[in-house]
Image: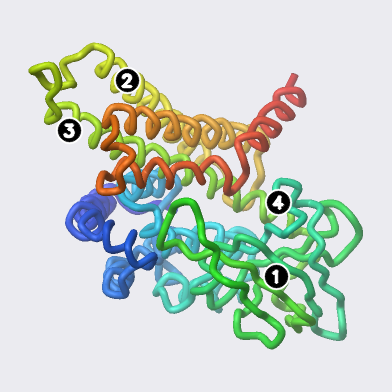
Amino acid sequence: MALDTESFELLLAAVQRFVRERLVPAENILEETDDVPADIIEDMKAMGLFGLTVPEEFGGIGLCVSQEVQVNYELGRTATAFRSVFGTNIGIGSQGILMDGTPEQKSDYLPKVASGELVMSFALTEPDAGSDAASLKTRAELDGDHYVLSGTKRFITNAPRAGAFTLMARTGGPGAGGVSSFIVPADLPGIKLGKTDKKMGQRGTKTCDVILENVRVPAANIIGGVPGQGFKTAMKVLDRGRLNISAVACGMAQRILEESVGYARDRKQFGKAIGEFQLIQAMLADSQAELLAGWSLVQDVARRFDGKPAHVSDPDISMRVSCAKLFCTEMVGRVADRGVQVHGGAGYINEYPVERFYRDSRLLRLYEGTTQIQQIIIGRELMRQG
């Protein structure tokens, strides 16, 4: 699926204008209040951002991956919390239903996701199962036509806002084959939320623990209707999510570079703009080269992603997704560090955007698979191919 070129260009221009005129001016409010203003969320719904990747037949816009990464590049140029409001929802929160769900699950949930009526979160990580996701301990015991779920999920993005979770639990034995993926409404008895996490950066994003105590979930809520497929669903979902995080990293690097170039033009030392000094230019040049390399990689992988059926897992494409996630999230960390360095002491003061981006960018190398997990995926696939 893909939006026609003319309509997509209009959408992209609207997103660029929204970022420039609504989101960037609200960054300081977001930082001070640790929340996204309600009127901005309503504007996002009106623009259709909650339905970017939901097919038109379910009320969404139906972007392909190549189009989605371009939108996320633009959204990366402002505070990450703005995208998080709907990005998790249409990304890892609901992609499992779109990729592997039954026709009934798609028709029941996707229209609500597209309209913004329903916010969905992705609940995989646990206190003892982060990078080793196949070792999760949350149990789902069959009891008649329901499963009874018990366990704790950790660092769940948008959990305080969520109306439902795509949640992985163990229905069988050890390892990946014993994991199933459930649609779990957030208002079911036995679900409790922990206190909202206080994080280094990314203020305005909401994460917390999700605690399940004997929560009864209909067996019909297993995504795809087949137990034991949950880990595979989660990994397919994360492939697309990781590619979009890579695009966000590139957009973030672009904003940091623009802020740095602007500062280098205006700041005077030794009688001239610091941007005239070659050592400053060298830092800017390194950031520009790495940004262009990363963005080219993202676009190439996105085109490959679009060339395969959405429900099919391709190890080679997964490896390339990991290459993009590894390179782009590490790249933006280096660009952010140089951005602070170009600003000098001012870069350590929170009135300058680079200070916030320096903190915000650090999380990109951790969530949806750490850099080290991406290295393992890449190395394992190279050995398999060889």
Q: Are marks 3 and 2 in contact (CB under 8 Å)?
A: no
Mark 3 or mark 4, earlier in chain: 4
Q: Residue at x 23, y 11 (%)?
A: 278
- Tag 2: Cα neighbours inside 10 Å, few (<14), some, or many (≥20)? some
Q: Is residue 21 rendered to the left or right of residue 365?
A: left
Whole-percent x, y for residue 93 in the image: 55, 63
Q: Which residue is mark 3?
A: 262
Q: CA distance from mark 3 to mark 4?
A: 40 Å
Discs 4/1, front: 4
Q: Residue at x 73, y 81 (%)?
A: 217
Q: Which residue is mark 1?
A: 182
Mark 2 or mark 1, earlier in chain: 1
Q: CA distance from mark 2 to mark 1?
A: 47 Å
| Picture disc at residue 130 | 4
Discs 3/4, front: 3
Mark 4 or mark 1, earlier in chain: 4
Please indicate, yes or no, whether residue 94 appears anywhere in the rendered image.
Answer: no
Mark 3 or mark 1, earlier in chain: 1
Q: Is residue 179 rendered to the left or right of residue 19?
A: right
Q: Secondary structure at mark 3?
A: helix
Discs 3/1, front: 3
Q: Residue furthest top?
A: 278
